[in-house]
Image: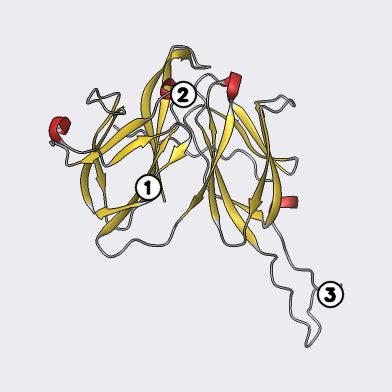
């Protein structure tokens, strides 16, 4: 089954990440001088998809905005001022960054940033989100290949009815490479099953089971895991999927 992770926002520092207008010294606005409009901002959420990485802290412009985030968890959206923002990911409680990248945030735009790959080659994957409402009776689903177990090869993705046989089916998405995402698929609301195979085969590596998607849902499904490595909590990082819904 899709396993929706819990939201892991531990600290929101308001200095750099929230903006307020300034009034007069008396606390009243002078006549004809209304409060200035808030500066433009975008929204960013973060997904920990690196299977052998420890819990992490996330910094935006040197302000810690998320703390001690475990593997397979993700944050809600954080409001971030528009412009070029520096995003750093460190092991929880540490100062040395494993990811240090600049993100160009557009006003009123939404982004998902995933920490992907094994620790030895960890890298960010930045996605621009489309949170416009689906058409009536529809859902929007985007699929992301973030499993380093298949980093050297692409995968096929089947989005079907729960009881469909994929042996004679054509993949919904073919040849999806590691650290890439599909566009949004618009499909009728209902029950679905997602199966992921090595490209050109019918050997199922990830099977979500039945997933119910009500009308209006906007979802991002992330293929994760690498049984060749152990998670920070111990044990192999089994193949699986994380579903993020808006």
Q: Residue at left 72%, top 64%?
A: 20
Which tag, 1 or 3, sits closer to the chain's start?
3
Q: Quadrant of residue 134?
A: bottom left
| Mark 2: few/some/many CA within 10 Å (<14, 14-19, 20+) | many
Decide if residue 54 is in sight here.
Answer: no
- Determine the CA span between mark 2 and mark 1: 22 Å
Residue 65 spot, x, y in % from top left: 65, 41
Which tag, 3 or 2, sits closer to the chain's start?
3
Q: Nearer the viewer, mark 3 or mark 2?
A: 2
Q: Is residue 24 above or below residue 40?
A: below
Which tag, 2 or 1, sits closer to the chain's start?
2
Q: Are marks 3 and 2 in contact (CB under 8 Å)?
A: no
- Check disc 3 and report its element: helix, strand or loop: loop
Q: Residue at left 44%, top 23%?
A: 152
- Check disc 2 and report its element: helix, strand or loop: helix
Residue 47 spot, x, y in % from top left: 51, 37
Residue placed under numbered mark 2 in the picture: 148
Q: Quadrant of residue 166?
A: top left
Q: Quadrant of residue 153?
A: top left
- Any mark on residue 230, and which? none
- Check disc 1 and report its element: helix, strand or loop: strand
| Mark 3: few/some/many CA within 10 Å (<14, 14-19, 20+) | few
- Determine the CA span between mark 3 and mark 2: 55 Å
Residue placed under numbered mark 1 in the picture: 219
Q: Residue at left 73%, top 25%?
A: 96
- Determine the CA span between mark 1 and mark 3: 45 Å
Q: Quadrant of the N terminus?
A: top left
- Any mark on residue 24, and which? 3
Residue 108 spot, x, y in % from top left: 57, 62
Q: Nearer the viewer, mark 2 or mark 1?
A: 2
């Amino acid at each position: 089954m899709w396993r929706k992770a819990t939201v892991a926002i531990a600290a929101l520092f308001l200095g750099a990440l929230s903006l307020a207008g300034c009034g007069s010294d008396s606390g009243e606005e002078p006549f004809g001088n209304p409060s200035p409009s808030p500066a433009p901002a975008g929204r960013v959420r973060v997904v920990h998809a690196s299977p052998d990485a420890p819990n992490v802290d996330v910094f935006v412009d040197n302000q810690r905005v998320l703390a001690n985030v475990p593997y397979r968890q993700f944050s809600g959206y954080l409001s971030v001022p528009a412009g070029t923002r520096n995003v750093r990911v460190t092991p929880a409680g540490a100062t040395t960054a494993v990811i240090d990248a600049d993100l160009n945030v557009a006003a009123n735009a939404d982004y998902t940033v995933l920490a992907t790959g094994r620790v030895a080659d960890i890298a960010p994957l930045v996605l621009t989100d489309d949170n416009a409402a689906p058409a009536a009776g529809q859902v929007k689903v985007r699929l992301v290949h973030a499993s380093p177990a298949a980093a050297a090869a692409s995968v096929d993705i089947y989005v079907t009815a729960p009881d469909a046989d994929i042996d004679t089916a054509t993949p919904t998405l073919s040849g999806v490479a590691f650290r890439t995402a599909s566009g949004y698929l618009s499909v009728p609301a209902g029950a679905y099953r997602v199966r992921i195979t090595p490209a050109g085969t019918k050997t199922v590596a990830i099977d979500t089971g039945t997933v119910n998607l009500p009308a209006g849902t906007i979802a991002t499904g992330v293929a994760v895991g690498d049984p060749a490595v152990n998670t920070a909590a111990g044990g192999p990082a089994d193949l699986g999927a994380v579903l993020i819904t808006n």
